[in-house]
Amino acid sequence: MTENNEHSDGIKRSKGKFDPVTEKRDWSIAASEEYCKRIARNTGKRLIEIIDTEEDSLLPIVCIFEGYLDD
């Protein structure tokens, strides 16, 4: 991933590739950053990173939440 930024809201923002197979953290995909925030609010999870995959798709944003997926 490239171009890492952390804004005043404490959420890290990145642009680049995302590999769902190797990602161990809890994640979801969304249409926009605002939808990531909505998912976090509705599920009670803390949003820690937003990845813009820069792909031309309906859901180009990956939302990373605090915690890890169970193996």
Image (spheres, rainbow, N blue to C red):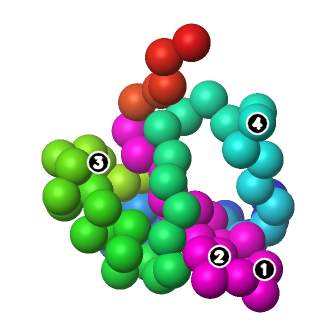
What's the distance in space between the residues labelled 1 and 2, CA to CA? 6 Å
Q: Is residue 31 left or right of residue 55?
A: left
Whole-percent x and y of residue 66?
Answer: 38, 38
Contact (Cβ within 8 Å) of mark 4 with mark 1: no
What's the distance in space between the residues labelled 2 and 3, CA to CA? 20 Å
What's the distance in space between the residues labelled 4 and 2, CA to CA? 17 Å
Kindly tell me whether residue 40 is visible in this rendering: yes
What's the distance in space between the residues labelled 4 and 3, CA to CA? 22 Å
Label 1 neighbourhood size at 10 Å, few (<14), some (14-19), many (20+)?
Answer: few
What's the distance in space between the residues labelled 1 and 3, CA to CA? 25 Å
Label 2 neighbourhood size at 10 Å, few (<14), some (14-19), many (20+)?
Answer: some
Instruction: Please tell me which of labels 2 and 3 falls first in the chain.
Output: 3
In this figure, which residue is indicated by the disc labeled 2? 60
In this figure, which residue is indicated by the disc labeled 3? 46
What's the distance in space between the residues labelled 4 and 1, CA to CA? 18 Å
Whole-percent x and y of residue 46?
Answer: 29, 48
In this figure, which residue is indicated by the disc labeled 1? 55
User: Which amino acid lies under the numbered mark 3 shown in the image of this protein?
Assistant: Arg
Farthest residue toward the bottom? 56
Q: Is residue 69 left or right of residue 62?
A: left
Q: Quadrant of residue 65?
A: top left
Which segment is the magenta one? 49-66
Instruction: Please tell me which of labels 4 and 3 falls first in the chain.
Output: 4
Whole-percent x and y of residue 30?
Answer: 49, 70
Q: Is residue 46 magenta?
A: no
